[in-house]
Each structure stands twice: as C-alpha cells, then as structure tokens.
Amino acid sequence: MASRCYLQCGWAIGIVLVSCIPSAFGQQRPAEDSSPEQWISRFARHWSDSAWTERFGGEQAGYMRVSEDQGWIARMWAFQALVKAGPASVPLLLERLNQGTVPERILAAQTLGYLGSAVPFDPLEQAVRREREPAVRLYLIDSLGLLGYANRVDWDSLMRTETNRDIRRHAMYAQQRGTTPLDSGVIERLTNWDWKSINSAAVGQPAPDFELPVLDGQPIRLSDFRGRKHVILVFLYGDT
C-alpha cells in the first residue's frame, strides 16, 4: 500500500518530524568532525522562517511546513551533532542564547537540555527571565527540567507574569520531574541515530516501517496496518 504521509509540525516538535520529505533533498551533510560553530552556522543558512505556511486560522496559523522544506534536515543534523559534541557545545549554545537569532536560540535552548552536568544552572535561569520569544522560553523550561534543575527554580516568581498556557504547563512538567535528569538511554539513542534514515520516507512512496510504544507500553508497527485504509501519522508533543 502506498501510504500517504501527512506531516504536522511546529517549533516544539521539530526533532522528530524530519522523515516526510522528498527523497532528493539535495543537502550535503558536513563531516562528522565539524565544529559546533560549523553545525550552528550551517543550520542558520538552511533554516528559513519564510518556509512556514498558514494552512489553518487562529492559534494553528503557521504551524505547518511544506513537504519540500529542507530546514528540518539541517536542524536535526545540527541537534544530533551538538549533543554528540557534548561539553564542547555548551559555551557556543549559551552564547547563542544571548546573541543568536530566534531559530538559533530555540535550537540552543532545546539542545542544552541534553548536555547534562556540563550546563550551568544560572545562565539558563537568567535566559528564561529575559527571553521574550515564547518558543525559546518553553524550551529553556524543558531543559531546566531535563537537567534536573527544577528544584532550584523560583517558579512562583518565574510564572508570576507568564500568560502563555503551554509554557505554564511545561513548567508544571519540569517541577514534576524535580531533580531527575534525562535518562541517559534517551541521549544514547539520539547520538546513535542513523542520520541517513532522515531520507527514508518520500512523498508518494510507501512509508518505511517503524515501531513505537503506545500508552500501555505495547509496541505498534506501521506494517500492522498495511493493506488497510490510509494511515495519518501525527506526532504530538507533550500536552498538545
């Protein structure tokens, strides 16, 4: 069955939504030993906010990307490479939190949550308080939780003037995590991810098989639905 592939994505779910793209994406991946600066610079060159399309009204406006967009490829490659670089990425990412463009600040805020004890608490907490872009604040709060820093945050003060519903909910998630950092197995799976698989799905072609756990922990495979009706895959993030 040639399954159709529908892609829903936004700032908050960019790291997983990179497979439903044309097979000939025409990007050359940098060498593995490229520096963190080179990965960030390449991401910035390939990411374009003009690629957003408004297919829905209201709050959903702008949260769909055209299938031909290639910015997600550069973003995922950079994200993985920066995490693999470990502590060497931290100074650059903290600098971009202060001086980078909005896309660079979002990427930096997200990536820092995967870099463990090499990331200091104070710069992240200060960045949350000064940041005006909601997507950056959300990822910074996620990272504070992923790093196990939630118990060090004055949440009452931080949330006093916060009006964004998603950010307030993610602050709740971070507080629930407490001092428990991100499981090392998650980071291992990310760093071992085969970047070549980013081109495994193509519009108009049968979707490649994959397996994921459902809410009860049991695995479900796309191939379980082969030969049935079309399957729509929507990857939701957190409280969406």
Image (cartoon, helix red, strand yellow):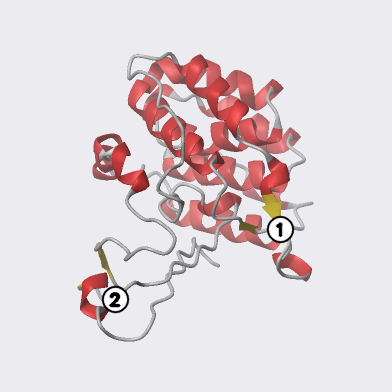
Q: Quadrant of the N terminus?
A: bottom left
Circle 1 — which element? loop
Near mark 2 (Cα within 10 A), the count class, few <14, some 14-19 or many ≥20, is: few
Identify the element where label 2 is drawn. loop
Q: Residue at x 27, y 40 (%)?
A: 193
In this rendering, which labeled residue sits more in front, label 2 or label 1?
Answer: 2
Looking at the image, which residue is at 57% across and 20% down? 41
| Residue drawn at point x = 30 percent, y = 39 percent | 196
Give, as a three-letter code, the residue at label 1: Gly
Q: Residue furthest bottom?
A: 228
Q: Is residue 139 visible?
A: yes
Residue 227 rendering spot, x and y as whole percentages:
25, 83
Three-letter residue code for mark 2: Met
Give the x, y percent position of residue 116.
Answer: 38, 31
- Please give left or right for residue 216 compared with residue 180 in the image: left
**Mark 1 surroundings within 10 Å by alpha-carbon count, few (fewer than 14), some (14 through 19), many (20 or more):** some
Q: Image height check: is 13 above or below 211?
A: above
**Which residue has dot 1 on it?**
62
Image coordinates of residue 32 in percent, x first then y, are 32, 20
The C terminus lies in quadrant: bottom right
Mark carried by residue 1: 2
The answer to whether residue 68 is left or right of residue 99 is left
- Can residue 150 be seen? no
Q: Work out whether residue 11 or residue 124 is closer to the camera in this orientation and state it.
A: 11
